[in-house]
């Protein structure tokens, strides 16, 4: 078994712990050591029977070879964490795919390092998932879709065929992006939104149909 730790002791991190246990139920691959989180109030506690191991600074000081799973939804925070931790050559980011998710050679799906796919995700064919993409429960990804590095999809998101999410896009629960739509880097799509036209980089869009309500600096 390989040693692995989870970054983030909140709800998403604990859901990631469930995913690791479910993977181990099929094949005992991971020795789950515990959680790292910058919330120092967790010191001396356990999270779902696993210890709090310290802050990200403490993780950077670890010298052993160690798999790291990031249980944080924010693309920006994920990007910052990876920028720090990838300098530590003994730390690596495995691809984690729930046993219920079908990824076969005939589907022509590519997965970047650190990609995480939760239970019930459905992928069709000719799909590209970038590094550190997180796809939460029961999302559907249509043919020829491309998801840029660090993008995060919350539960129940539906991406139609040939959609393109550039780097670090966040898509809220039950949002839908229609066929052929492109979403610019660092854009946030609100829960339940329906995106029926291209969105630029660095904005927040909500509603049905989705409308831009905020633009922010990249």
Image (cartoon, helix red, strand yellow):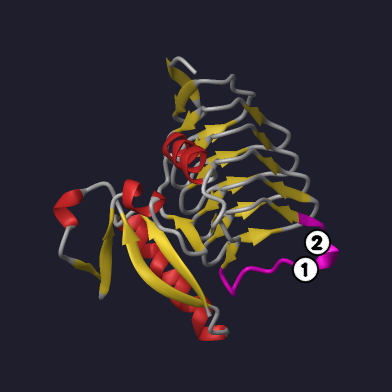
Q: Can you see residue 40? A: yes
Of 209 and 168, which appears nearest the observer? 168
Q: Position of residue 168 (x, y in %)?
A: 54, 34
Kindly identify which numbered label has been placed on residue 104: 1
For the residues marked 2 and 1, what is the alpha-carbon distance in whole angstroms? 5 Å
Q: Secondary structure at mark 1?
A: loop
Q: Position of residue 112 (x, y in %)?
A: 67, 50
Q: Position of residue 65 (x, y in %)?
A: 52, 64
Q: Secondary structure at mark 2?
A: helix
Q: Mark 2 and 1 residues: CB-CB less than 8 Å, in contact?
A: yes
- Name the side, left or right, on which 174 lies relative to 179: left
Main SS category, magenta section: loop
Residue 103 drawn in magenta: yes
Q: Position of residue 95 (x, y in %)?
A: 60, 60
- Name the side, left or right, on which 1 lies relative to 216: right
Mark 2 closeness class: few <14, some 14–19, many ≥20 residues within 10 Å: some
Quarter assignment of residue 12: bottom left
Residue 170 drawn in magenta: no
Kindly identify which numbered label has been placed on residue 72: none
* Residue at figure coordinates x 38%, y 64% from the top left: 15
Magenta segment, which residues? Answer: 98-109
* Residue at figure coordinates x 82%, y 57% from the top left: 108
Q: Can you see residue 171? A: no
Of 139 and 34, which appears nearest the observer? 34
- Name the side, left or right, on which 6 lies relative to 87: left
* Residue at figure coordinates x 75%, y 50% from the top left: 127
Which residue is label 2 attached to? 107
Would you place residue 111 above or below residue 161 in this image? below
Mark 1 closeness class: few <14, some 14–19, many ≥20 residues within 10 Å: few
* Residue at figure coordinates x 49%, y 55% from the top left: 136
């Amino acid at each position: 078994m390989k040693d692995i730790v989870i970054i983030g002791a909140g709800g998403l991190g604990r859901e990631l712990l469930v995913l690791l246990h479910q993977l181990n139920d099929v094949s005992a691959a991971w020795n789950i050591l515990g959680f790292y989180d910058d919330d120092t109030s967790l010191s001396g506690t356990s999270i779902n029977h696993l210890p709090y191991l310290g802050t990200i600074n403490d993780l950077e000081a670890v010298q052993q070879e160690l798999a790291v799973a990031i249980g944080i939804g924010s693309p920006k925070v994920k990007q910052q964490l990876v920028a720090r931790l990838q300098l530590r050559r003994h730390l690596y980011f495995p691809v984690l795919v729930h046993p219920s998710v079908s990824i076969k050679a005939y589907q022509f799906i590519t997965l970047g390092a650190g990609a995480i796919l939760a239970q019930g995700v459905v992928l069709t064919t000719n799909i590209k998932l970038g590094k550190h993409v997180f796809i939460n429960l029961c999302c559907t990804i249509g043919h020829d879709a491309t998801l840029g590095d660090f993008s995060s999809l919350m539960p129940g998101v539906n991406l139609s065929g040939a959609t393109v999410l550039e780097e670090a896009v966040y898509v809220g629960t039950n949002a839908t992006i229609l066929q052929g739509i492109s979403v610019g880097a660092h854009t946030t799509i609100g829960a339940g939104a329906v995106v029926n036209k291209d969105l630029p980089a660095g904005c927040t869009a909500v509603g049905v149909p989705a409308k831009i309500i905020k633009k922010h600096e990249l």
